[in-house]
Image: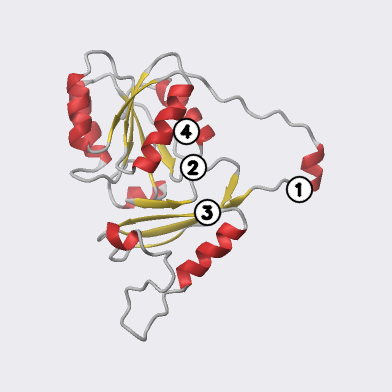
Amino acid sequence: MGRLAGGVIHDFNNMPIVSDNGCGMDRETLEMIFEPFFTTKEKGVGTGLGLSTVYGIIKQNGGFINVYSEQAEGTAFRIYLPWVPSADKQEKNVPSEEVPKGRGETILLVEDEFQILNPCRRFLEDLGYEVLIAGAPSEALKVTEEHAGKIHLLITDLILPEMNGRELAEKLLKIKPDMKCLFMSGYTANGIARHGVLEKGVFFLQKPLDMKKLAMKVCQALEQDRWPNRPGTTDR
């Protein structure tokens, strides 16, 4: 599970991830970590001002911080600050890369964080895709079984309640064998691979989500053969 303090990213620089493989945090702790004077340490040991200070500095500079943590798996922090082009680049009029549009394909989007699920759904619908949503694997299985038409692409978080995204994909592919897959996570592709959840070469997108990268990755995944028969590409 993750917490995105700020929103979905657009023109931001992502900074190096600070991560560990410790005990991780539960949802209640994750919701409180940026609150002033909140600490999990014993009384007199910690002030509870460290992360709140970090959060304040980042917000004052127009950025945000992503926290992704799973109990018994570890925690990852990633800082995003606004992108400011250098003076010479500002003088150049470089056309922005066109965002690829959909052609009415159906996408199943599985994400247990609704602050990510809903903006992604609206963005994909604006691109011309039909989007089915699910907040948990059991809901995704139900939606897939009840959907009479073709589901062209599954987009799923790798860390979910009930089962991980890879296990969910394997179950859904038994129902819709022609469906293609795109995985996403707050951890890096290398970090996920170390946990044995994701094979190298499959389609993967790093959280927090850059909408332009999401659009590009969806287009790439739809153009490839069904996972895992042909390798995909990762965003690290």
Q: CA distance from mark 3 to mark 2?
A: 10 Å
Please state the horizontal and vertical placement of residue 187, each as a whole percent of the image.
39, 50
At x 32%, y 51%, the residue is: 1
Check whether the beta carbons of the residues at disc 2 and disc 1 lie within 8 A of each other.
Answer: no
Locate residue 153, reporting x and y percent. Answer: 34, 24
Q: Are marks 3 and 2 in contact (CB under 8 Å)?
A: no
Q: Secondary structure at mark 3?
A: strand
Q: Check disc 1 and report its element: helix, strand or loop.
A: loop
From the viewer's perspective, is 56 left or right of 232?
Answer: right
Circle 2 residue: 8
- Going from N to C along the chain, the mark reached first, 3 or 1, is 3
Residue 189 visible in this rendered orientation of the protein: yes
Mark 4 is surrounded, within 10 Å at the Cα level, by few (under 14), some (14 to 19) or many (20 or more) other residues, namely: many
Q: Which of marks 2 and 3 precedes in the sequence?
A: 2
Q: Which residue is mark 1?
A: 86
Type of amino acid under label 1: Ser
What residue lies at 22% left-to-right and 24% top-to-bottom? 144
Res 166 → quadrant = top left
On the image, the x and y values in percent for residue 116 come to: 39, 40
Q: Are marks 2 and 4 in contact (CB under 8 Å)?
A: no
Q: CA distance from mark 1 to mark 4?
A: 26 Å
Provide the residue designation for mark 4. Answer: 214
Circle 3: is it few (<14), some (14-19), or many (20+) Cα within 10 Å? many
Q: Could you tell me which secondary element the residue under label 2 belongs to? A: loop
* Residue 73 against residue 92 in the figure, above or below: below
Asked whether the beta carbons under mark 1 and mark 4 sit within 8 Å of each other, the answer is no
Q: Is residue 94 left or right of residue 38?
A: right
Provide residue 229's location: percent of width, then percent of height.
31, 26
> Sequence-wise, which precedes: disc 1 or disc 4?
1
Mark 4 belongs to which amino acid?
Answer: Leu
Q: Quadrant of residue 155?
A: top left
